[in-house]
Amino acid sequence: MEAHDDDLRHFEAHGAPALPEAEEQGYVEWDGARIWYSAYGAGPAVILLHGGLGHSGNWGHQVPSLVETGRRVVLIDSRGHGRSTRDSRPYSYELMASDVLAVMDRVQLDKAAVAGWSDGACTGLVLARQVPARIAGVFFFACNMDPSGTKEFESTAVIDRCFRRHAKDYAELSSTPDAFDDFVAAVGEMMSTQPNYSASDLAEIRVPVAIAQGEHDEFIKGEHAEYLARSIPRAELLRLSDVSHFAPLQRPELFNGAMHRFLDQVLPVGE
């Protein structure tokens, strides 16, 4: 039986499971930043993009599952997150999308699927719109594509536990370990104003997209997920029961199953 961490007590205390040994990892010097990446396995590639304030280690439940099924997995610490650095410019999803392309070039990936969580999902859809030839599909979990899609913030014990874990990880991984408060403020400014895609912008996305929404998401309106699925051609809506914004940590088998089914459709193993 799958172990659940619905209240994130285990995540707060221990973090996600440790990542396996990488076959390749390092930094890409790109546009004012050093972007950390790591790669695992072989086969059709999927890039996992973590959420805001987090880092790639939060995918610890997902990487082994993907590698075991015959996929190459690429992780990227978003600009200013985890081990990656940033310059003085404000955060933007477009800038982080360019970082992903720089990593794809470094690891010689002409095309990959993207699975994005929260801010990582936004970055994935930006890539899908800007460079569709390089994106096989986007598994878009738990994010908005315009400011109207977010709920009014209400702190909960689960959110607080996640935030405390993020603060601890930032202090351990970042090159600016004492700057967590400034980091949170800068990422929060981006989240409050970006992305701001119109319905016509969404209609330009031509790659396959799955809009996955947790039943109890603390941040994203359910009706916004429905709107995205209607507005993006070829998109499907996936509802994940009994989980919230933190489904990859809370019930990884549920999340992984939905992700695998999508990836098998857009970039099957063996092709």
Image (tube, grey):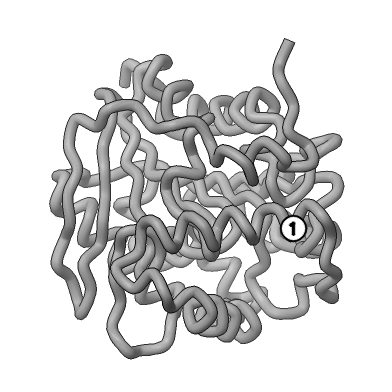
Identify the residue at horizontal 14%, vertical 44% (top origin).
Answer: 108
Identify the residue at horizontal 71%, vertical 30% (top origin).
Answer: 251
Identified by mark 1, the residue type is: Ile
Using the image as rendered, state which of residue 150 and residue 84 is in the foreground: 84
Rendered location of residue 17, percent (x, y): 50, 31
Rendered location of residue 52, percent (x, y): 54, 64
Q: At numbered mark 1, what does the secondary structure look like: helix, strand or loop?
A: helix
Asked whether residue 241 is in view, the answer is yes
Query: Would residue 38 be found to the left or right of residue 26 on screen?
Result: right
Quarter of the picture holding the C terminus: top left
Quarter-wise, where is residue 210 in the image? top right
Quarter of the picture holding the N terminus: top right
Using the image as rendered, state which of residue 57 and residue 74 is in the foreground: 57
Residue under label 1, please give it. Answer: 159
197 over 73 or under it: above or below = below
As drawn, the residue found furthest toward the top would be 1
Query: Would residue 120 be found to the left or right of residue 228 on screen?
Result: left
Query: Would residue 36 be found to the left or right of residue 217 on screen?
Result: left
